[in-house]
Image (cartoon, rainbow, N blue to C red):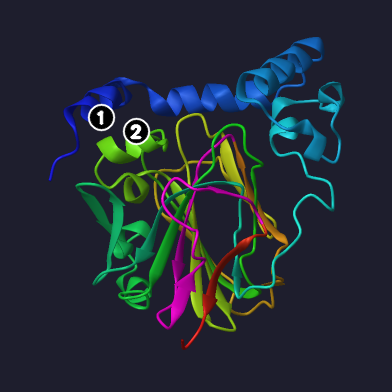
Amino acid sequence: MSPPLSDRLAVLPQYLLPKQALTSAAGRMASAHGGAFTTALIRRFVARYGVNMTEAANPDPASYASFNEFFTRPLRSDARPLAAADWICPVDGTVSQLGTIDDGQIFQAKGHRFSATALVGGNAALAERFRNGYFATLYLSPRDYHRIHMPCTGRLQRMVHVPGDLFSVNPTTARGVPGLFARNERVVCVFEGALGLFVMVLVGATIVGSMATVWHGTVNPPRPGHLRAWEYLDQNITLNQGVEMGRFLLGSTVVMLLPQGPLQFAPDWASSRPIRMGEAMATHSLG
């Protein structure tokens, strides 16, 4: 089934925009130390998007030297308590979609699915591990906290930077662009946890200047235009549940692939539901 005509028309200009150039320009501006201009920009952003600065470790907009520093601001240590759950929510944002992976296919929006193989950069063997597993697609809007945390304790296995487009990842675009999350630039992080292998895919978007992980630092730029991979099997990089694993510079999306098994998402988790990092996301249960 095709997406509604209104959604297709709404995303049409994105096919024509110079998205790479816009993203590079936005990245340079966001990293600039602009003094009073930077402070004014931050204050305007806070007012425009209703950012809750009372949760920030440093609530004073004038204290941030660059927009990026503000955008990736840490929260107070007591702002996000961690639930007692097998899987906790890794981000603040909104549930885009979640559910089972059906024979390797992931639901994006009405009329759209994409393959787990395409999402992880063409690694069919990795995707096969999740053929009938579970997924959760979590959207971070501009107003949200943009650090990404571990849903459970995991040992890092591999990281892949997959080049791609830079479409917006807002709900309208998700409805209007086929295979959106498997065609945008993304960073695929593979972990082994107590309940099995799991994957966290950080999806880039228009004006997302870069993505970074705590073990590597900034992954992009550079953007060489070809797939890059890093192997960590010979290193013991283990991140505990709830600790930071990465961050976005400007809003985007995280797609999680979870292992097969008796997994149950939290009863109130559904598409369009607001979420907060640290709340219960899912449990493994036989009943």
Dot 1 falls on a residue whose secondary structure is helix
SS for callout 2: helix
For badge 2, the amino acid type reads Thr
N-terminal-most mark, 2 or 1: 1
CB atoms of marks 2 and 1 within 8 Å: yes
Asked if the magenta segment contains residue 28, the reply would be no
Q: Is residue 275 located in the magenta-colored stretch of the structure? A: yes
Does 138 sit left or right of 60 as displayed?
left
Q: Residue at x 74, y 17 (%)?
A: 43
Asked where in the image residue 153 lies, by quadrant, the reply is bottom right
**Residue most toward the left?**
1
- Tell me where the magenta segment starts and ends, as one range: 250-277
The 10 Å Cα crowd at callout 1, few under 14, some 14 to 19, many 20 or more, is some
Up the image or down, 88 lies above or below 61; here it is below
Residue beneath label 2, please? 172
Per the image, the residue denoted by label 1 is 7
- Residue count near mark 2 (Cα–Cα under 10 Å), binned few <14, some 14–19, many ≥20: some
Residue at image x 49%, y 48%? 273
Q: Which SS does the magenta portion mostly show?
A: loop
